Image: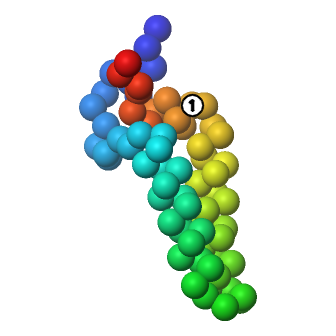
């Protein structure tokens, strides 16, 4: 039985896995422009949170475009 998330039109854009990974990399690169401290740590935490989300299968199914091969 399909989940509700699959049957309803999403109100947010969907991205490919590659786009999300690149976005996380960009956040880490941006974090490196700051000297060690709270602002740099905040950006690193965002990247870490994204990494955790990407590992969550249910989140990926609801938010990542399916491969159309």
Q: Position of residue 31 (x, y in %)?
A: 59, 77
Residue at position x 51%, y 66% from top?
A: 26
Q: Tell me what residue is drawn at x 57 percent, y 31 percent.
A: 58
Q: Position of residue 33 (x, y in %)?
A: 58, 84
Relative to 34, does residue 56 appear above or below in the rendering?
above
Q: Is residue 5 above or below residue 39?
A: above
Q: Secondary structure at mark 1?
A: helix
Quarter-wise, where is residue 3 in the image? Answer: top left
- Identify the colour scheme used: rainbow
Which residue sits at x=54%, y=37%? 59
In depth, the one of 31 and 42 nearer the eye is: 31
Residue wearing tag 1: 58
Q: Quadrant of residue 28?
A: bottom right
* Residue 7 relative to residue 51: left or right: left
Taking the spot 68% from the left edge, 78% from the top edge, the residue there is 41
For label 1, the crowd category at 10 Å Cα-Cα, with few meaning under 14, some 14 to 19 and many 20 or more, is few
Where in the figure is residue 61, as x and y percent of width and height? 49, 29
- The quadrant of the picture occupied by the C terminus is top left
Q: In the visual, does 23 lie left or right of 41?
A: left
Q: Position of residue 2 (x, y in %)?
A: 43, 14
Image height of 20 relative to 39, above or below: above
Residue 58: in sight, yes or no?
yes
Occupied quadrant, residue 8: top left
Q: Residue furthest right?
A: 36
Q: Is residue 63 visible?
A: no
- Front residue of 18/44: it is 18
């Amino acid at each position: 039985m399909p989940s509700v998330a699959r049957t309803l039109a999403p109100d947010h854009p969907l991205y490919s896995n590659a786009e999300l990974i690149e976005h996380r990399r960009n956040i880490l690169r941006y974090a490196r422009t700051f000297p060690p401290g709270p602002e740099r740590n905040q950006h690193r935490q965002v990247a870490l949170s994204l990494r955790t989300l990407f590992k969550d299968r249910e989140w990926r199914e609801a938010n990542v475009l399916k491969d159309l091969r």
